[in-house]
Every structure is written in C-alpha cells, then in structure tokens.
Amino acid sequence: MTKSRDTTEAAFNKRAASYDSNSWHIGYARRLVELVAPTPGIRILDAATGTGFAAIAAARATGPAGRVVGVDISAGMLDRARQSITAAGLTNIDLVQADATSLPHFADASFDLVLCSAGLLYLPVQAALREWHRLLAPGGLIAFSTMREGFPVGARLFREQARRYGLDLTDPATPLGTESRCAHALREAGITPTAPVAETVQFSRGDLEHAWEAHVHGPHHDAIATLVPEQVQAFQHDYTSALADLLRDDEDRLLNPEVIYAFGRKPSPPTAAEPAPTDPTEPTGADPFQQF
C-alpha cells in the first residue's frame, strides 16, 4: 500500500465516527441509487462505500435475490457501515476492505452495476474507471456522483483561506467537474456515456459544523499536515469565522451546491444481426437506466 493510500485510510478512519452526522451525504448517495433504480436480483458493487449509504439503498432496491458488495479502504468506515447494515436488518450486503481501484479477487464481469457516490474525489479516476469496466458485465452500468467545479462554496472558501498559510490547494472537483469531463473520463475507460443529471444537493446548517473536519481529513489532508499546530489552530479559527460570515450573507448559495450524476454503459459485443454503432462516444440522450 502506498503512503498516499495509508494517509487516505488514516484520514477516513478519523472521520468515521462523525461521517454519518453529515446529512447531505445520505441524501446524495440515495439520490444516485434512486436515479439508477436497480431492479431485483442484480449484482452491485458500491466502490468507496464509506459508511454504506449507497450500499444500503441499493440493497433495499435490488432485494434479497440481489447482492451488493461495498468496498472501502478504511476499516473505520466499514465498521460504521457494518453497524448500519445490521440495524437495517439487511443480509444481502458484503463489505470488503480494499483499494477500490484494484480488486483482483473479483473476476471479470462480476457485477451488473457499479456505484460510486462522491468517492472518485479521492481516487485516480482512470485507474478506478478501467477497473470497474473490467468488473462490469457487458451492458452493465457505471454510475457516479461528483461536485460541479467550484462547489461546494464552503470548500472554495477553505482553499482561499489556505493561501494565507502558504498552501496552494487545487479544486479536487476539477477533473470531473463538468458534464463533458465526466463523459470524456468514461470514454477514456471504454465506457459509453449516457445522459447525465445535473442538480443541487442540500446542506443543513448542522452539516457546516463538520466542514472543517471534512476538509482537514479530506482531499487536502496531506497539505494540512505540513502546517505546525499553531498554524492549524489559527487556520481553523479564520475559516470557521469566514464560513459563518458567508452563511449570514449568502445562505442559499452556501447550502445548495451544484452536483453532477454521471452514467455510462460497458458496450456489449456486437452480434452478426446487430452491427456496432458508428459513433459510440456521445451520450445517447435516451433513458440511461432502462436495463435496470
């Protein structure tokens, strides 16, 4: 396991105890599953499952005849997921601690659907999508969610404040932050993109109470670790004060970030009676989920 993976696991282990307190995470994951609408009996991989929000929603949708495998690098997150699964009385979910970009213990075409709610923010995108392509059965669907570039506004504010402490942080949403970038990433992995869905997701005021922790133990955790404790303390004070000011001045923009739900299918091999399409690279615009 690389140092980056070690630190990512450690960061999410620290976030595990409070992760479920962010109500928007739950709605975000459930909406992804709702858009896909899994049918009974299919095989589902929930990559970077975290505390299992999408896995639980998918398990309920596919029913006892289906199977969901939730994969995450963080043992702490999986422990929380296991508690939630037990409390929900679900028996059709398996949890595996592993790097979601490398799952050699699963055979090719093991799944009909791969979900990733918000997790690509922390993963090398092409490595993940190519591995999920391998794991999908022909005709299977990949569905992931991402923040639009520049959102959430509170994260942009965090990056602005970080410059005062010598940190030049990039927007982690940039690689997948537009519909066209999502489609390009899917095509690069051999997946045919279908029509994305652009919406907003709602934060609560309570979610903002966890914003500092989410950033410090999120995509920028390595950069924050370079600061001395006194700098971290001052940074936290400056950021939480600026966040409170923004909440007062522009609550609607702060609490309603723009998100993208992206979808793509693994092409099925053409048959003699059904030649390959001439241009499989563009979104079809048709109902992207009719198989499920």
Image (tube, rainbow, N blue to C red):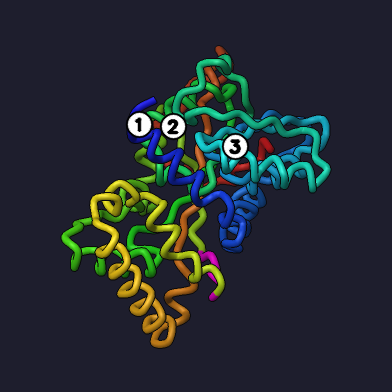
> Residue drawn at (77%, 33%), measured in percent from left and top?
92
**Would you place residue 94 above or below residue 77 in this image?**
above
User: Does residue 108 show up magenta in the picture?
Assistant: no
Pointer 3 or 2: first along the chain: 3
Quadrant for the N terminus, please: top left
- Secondary structure under tag 1 reads helix
1 vs 3, front mark: 3
- Secondary structure under tag 2 reads helix
Give the extent of the magenta segment. 200-205
**Would you place residue 136 above or below residue 243 in this image?**
above
Whether residues under marks 1 and 2 lie with C-beta atoms below 8 angstroms apart, the answer is: yes
The percent position of residue 48, horizontal first and vertical second, equals 52, 39
Q: How crowded is mark 2: few (under 14 residues within 10 Å), some or many (20 or more)?
A: many
Per the rendering, the mark at residue 188 is 1
3 vs 2, front mark: 3
- Secondary structure under tag 3 reads strand
Q: What residue sits right under mark 2 in the picture?
A: 129
What is the spatial separation of the Cα atoms under label 1 and label 3, in whole angstroms? Answer: 21 Å
